[in-house]
Amino acid sequence: SFHSVSFSETDHPKVLITGGLGQLGVGLAKLLRKRFGKNNVILSDIRKPPSHVFHSGPFIYSDILDYKNLREIVVNNRITWLVHYSALLSAVGESNVALARAVNITGLHNILDIAAEHGLRLFVPSTIGAFGPTSPRNPTPDLCVQRPRTIYGVSKVHAELMGEYYHHRYGLDFRCLRYPGIISADSQPGGGTTDYAVQIFHDAVKTGKFECNLKPDTQLPMMYIDDCLRATLEVMEAPAEILSMRTYNINAMSFTPEELAQEVRKQLPDLQMTYEVDHIRQAIADSWPMNFDDSNARNDWGWKHDYDLPELVQTMFNFIGSESRVAQAN
Ligand SMILES: NC(=O)c1ccc[n+]([C@@H]2O[C@H](COP(=O)([O-])OP(=O)(O)OC[C@H]3O[C@@H](n4cnc5c(N)ncnc54)[C@H](O)[C@@H]3O)[C@@H](O)[C@H]2O)c1
Ligand SMILES: C[C@@H](O)[C@H](N)C(=O)O
């Protein structure tokens, strides 16, 4: 029913997306622009946008470590919703802990203060990585032990707790979803443990081979990007009174590299899969949920995923296949 709400010109939110040039931001901007109008959604990042992104709607430079710059953007553009996507993901975070701590923790403090100061609705994604080896892994509920062993996970637990604290203490309209590993065809992941589940499609189409950096039986929760972005819009539009919590697990499917390869072979029977385990990524994956319990999201605000494994694989092949046909024709 959220989809049927229509906004008049004046009550459209004015949205700022930080870290918008990563795997998820461009797709989210597209979805939100369709809903709220092109000029009501501003993408920002510290990187230079590719020309198709630059020409598809407003883009500005924003470093979340620069508080004054953030405040100027929020004030000058009369921002009402902030989607905070900037982060260093799990694997890159482990290779640069100081930067991950600055971006994921100090940056988040700037975002919380700006959002509280200007009465913004704030979305911050968390992750399956906010759980650790002492959490129940199969399934992992919303409320349980959270002792992650990565700087990424620690920073995301911190974000969940700080957002909820600002909500209770200052009335900040903080909303948070714990995303599974997200799979997308037209954007590249930014250095996470679940990246293999995107790379397999590109390598399979290009070379017929894939070398996986996780063990064949490593089971992790995953989701197709369209489901993830729709969930984000839905929780942002949900009336506050139906949210019994401010941080929810969301899920779609769980699979292992071996199970993904089997599904891929239905499209490409000759796929050759080999394993060269990356011990850092494997240790991270072994400490994460295998299945995610998202019953609170389903009960409270009607979360429902559209893509299971077969639809995901079919959709990825349709997209990547059509891209490679266009590339060959050129
Ligand atoms: N992709 C996933 O599978 C996944 C799963 C769970 C949660 N999430 C969360 O969703 C969010 C978006 O993820 P993503 O996959 O698009 O990440 P990504 O790594 O692809 O992109 C992150 C972006 O943040 C930007 N950034 C880095 N430092 C910055 C700074 N100082 N100021 C402003 N921007 C800066 C980077 O340039 C990059 O474009 C992240 O918070 C991530 O933790 C993602
Ligand atoms: C799971 C998620 O947070 C991200 N894709 C990572 O692997 O780090």
Image (spheres, grey):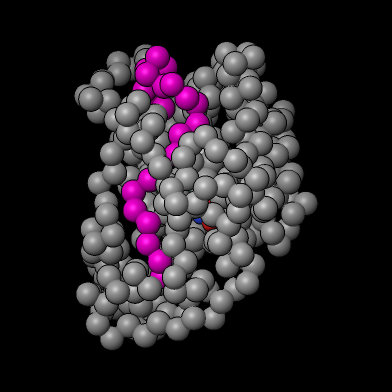
In the foreground, 164 or 136: 136
Quarter holding the N terminus is top left
The location of residue 40, given as percent across then percent down, is: 42, 28
Quarter holding the C terminus is bottom left
Q: Is residue 284 magenta?
A: no
The location of residue 44, given as percent across then percent down, is: 55, 40
The location of residue 99, given as percent across then percent down, is: 74, 51
Residue in the picture at 40% in, 82% down: 273
Residue 228 in view: yes
The location of residue 324, given as percent across then percent down, is: 30, 73
From the viewer's perspective, is 130 left or right of 210? right
The stretch of residues the image draws in magenta is: 236-257
Q: Relative to residue 314, is residue 151 depicted above or below?
A: above
Residue 52 in view: no
Q: Relative to residue 249, is residue 164 depicted above or below?
A: above
Residue in the picture at 36% in, 36% down: 295
Q: Is residue 238 magenta?
A: yes
Q: Relative to residue 308, is residue 64 depicted above or below?
A: above
Residue in the picture at 47% in, 25% down: 245
Seen as rendered, the residue at the extreme right is 98
Number of callouts in the render?
Answer: 0
Residue in the picture at 57% in, 13% down: 171
